[in-house]
Image: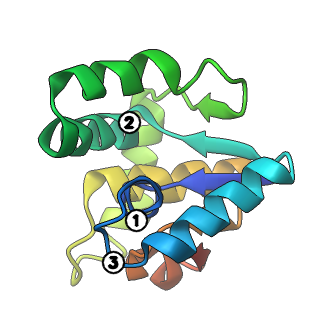
Amino acid sequence: MAGSLFLDTAGWFAALSPKERGHDAARAAYADAVRRGLLLVTTPLVVAEMHTLIVRWRGPQAGAYFLETVFETGTHTLVRLDEALFQTALSRWIRKFADKPVSLADAVSFEVMRRERISHALTSDRHFADAGFTILK
């Protein structure tokens, strides 16, 4: 997707939480993407991770608010996952990085980025760079 930015948990949460390392840069990158009209793309796995972090940080009401409102603006797109995507993520990314602690959520993210032709991710996770993507942090 031309004009898209992938939202990973590490960068997205850093953009929201002032206590996170890299907050100012992540917040600026997120705001710039919104200002430029980029489509912000993520997966249900990332949303689940974000929800967990927000509940721990701000409580269950903030977590519920996040889930209820994040996709109302039209700037965020949630990519649907299916078994074929999981299988490809496993074969293409988990096996490729068998010597690194790449999570299933990251492997699925890499495959979504590859399929959707998204080259940039809002993240501080170096695994995205290892997988050949540009990270904004």
Label 3 belongs to which residue?
21
* Residue furthest front as drawn: 18
Q: Secondary structure at mark 3?
A: loop
- Looking at the picture, the colour scheme in use is rainbow
Q: Residues within 10 Å of mark 2 (few under 14, many from 20)?
A: some
Image coordinates for residue 34, horizontal then vertical, percent: 75, 48
> Which of the numbered marks, if any, corresponds to residue 47?
2
Query: Is 17 placed left or right of 100 in the picture?
Result: right
Count of labels shown? 3
The residue positioned 57% from the left and 76% from the top of the image is 135
> Which of the numbered marks, if any, corresponds to residue 93?
1
Image coordinates for residue 91, horizontal then vertical, percent: 38, 58
- Disc nearer the start of the sequence (2/3): 3
Q: Secondary structure at mark 2?
A: helix
Which dot, 1 or 2, sits closer to the camera? 2
Name the residue nearer the viewer: 20 or 131. 20
